[in-house]
């Protein structure tokens, strides 16, 4: 099938760094998927058995014709039919149930877990919500949402594994930081499997040497990211991971190697 992705923003992946977004777009283009950035859909019409989409880009218009049209316009919580107005449970302007750091609503005895609270739209964040509420209710363990580190995967082929801050967020914070990158073509496991697209990137606090974030776009990136994530939760310096002996041949074994090439983020 011929596929065209039309994106209004200048980057395909708005929450990711520019280099990651461009790399993903290049991977899609290698799969013969057209990616139109800075493009606005200004019209949709029927053309026989097909659908014609009019796209405006740099003040010029063009048409994309296909058999199917998928619109991705975001999510909203299905909270409008829960009778929340009868309970006094507060929601924000988008309909998400407002909760505190332990997922309690403004009404005593009512907690909100999962997508409805706007604290994450993933299965793993919903499960962690459950763990937090159970810990507070049954175990007298004051676990909090703010204790968790942002982590998710984008299941492109190859996948993107993400943890912590992006490079843009680190730069915006103004803190001294270090950065290291490695192309997946330099990772022996990826080379052996003939899957060398993508790269790895890690960011470290320049003073504490704790890991701030990482982006692993490539073979097993969604799995390898966890060895970085666990060190982040331990609040250990990156040298712990840098000096670890990893199993060969794996993708993870090159994370310590990458850390040997940390340089100032300028």
Image (cartoon, rainbow, N blue to C red):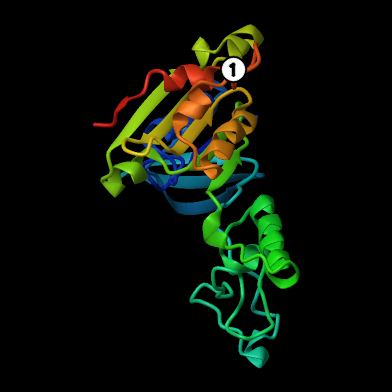
Q: Which quadrant: the C terminus?
A: top left
Whether 124 is drawn above or below 97: the answer is: above
| Image point (66%, 65%), residue name | 141
Question: Which residue is most to the right?
Answer: 138
Q: Residues within 10 Å of mark 1 (few under 14, many from 20)?
A: few
* Disc 1 secondary structure class: loop
Q: Which quadrant: the N terminus?
A: top right
Residue 62 image position (x, y, % from top left): 41, 40
Whether 202 is drawn above or below 15: the answer is: above
Is any atom of residue 73 visible in this view? Answer: no
Hey, which quadrant is residue 155 in on the image? top right
Is any atom of residue 113 visible in this view? Answer: yes
Residue 34 image position (x, y, % from top left): 50, 31
| Image point (51%, 28%), residue name | 240
Residue 133 image position (x, y, % from top left): 69, 67
* Front-lying residue, 235 or 15: 235
Question: Which residue is most to the bottom?
Answer: 86
Hey, which quadrant is residue 213 in on the image? top left
> Would you name the residue on which mark 1 appears?
245
* Front-lying residue, 75 or 165: 165
Residue 49 image position (x, y, % from top left): 67, 44
């Amino acid at each position: 099938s011929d596929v065209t992705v039309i994106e209004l923003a200048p980057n395909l992946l708005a929450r990711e760094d520019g280099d990651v977004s461009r790399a993903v777009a290049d991977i899609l283009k290698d799969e013969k998927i057209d990616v139109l950035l800075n493009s606005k859909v200004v019209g949709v019409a029927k053309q026989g058995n097909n659908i014609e989409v009019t796209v405006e880009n740099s003040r010029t218009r063009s048409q994309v014709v296909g058999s199917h049209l998928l619109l991705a316009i975001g999510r909203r919580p299905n909270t409008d039919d829960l009778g929340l107005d009868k309970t006094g449970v507060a929601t924000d302007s988008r309909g998400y149930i407002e909760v505190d750091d332990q997922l309690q609503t403004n009404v005593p005895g009512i907690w909100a877990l999962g997508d409805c609270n706007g604290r994450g739209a993933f299965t793993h964040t919903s499960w962690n919500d459950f763990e937090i509420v159970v810990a507070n209710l049954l175990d007298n363990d004051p676990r909090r949402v703010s204790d968790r580190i942002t982590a998710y995967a984008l299941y492109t082929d190859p996948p993107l594994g993400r943890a912590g801050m992006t490079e843009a967020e680190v730069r915006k914070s103004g803190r001294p930081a270090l950065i290291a990158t490695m192309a997946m073509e330099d990772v022996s496991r990826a080379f052996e499997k003939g899957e060398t697209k993508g790269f790895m990137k890690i960011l470290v606090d320049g003073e504490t040497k704790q890991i701030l974030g990482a982006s692993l776009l490539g073979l097993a990136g969604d799995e390898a990211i966890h060895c970085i994530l666990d060190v982040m939760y331990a609040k250990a310096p990156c040298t712990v991971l840098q000096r670890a002996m990893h199993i060969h041949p794996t993708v993870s074994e090159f994370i310590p190697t990458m850390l040997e090439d940390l340089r100032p983020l300028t």
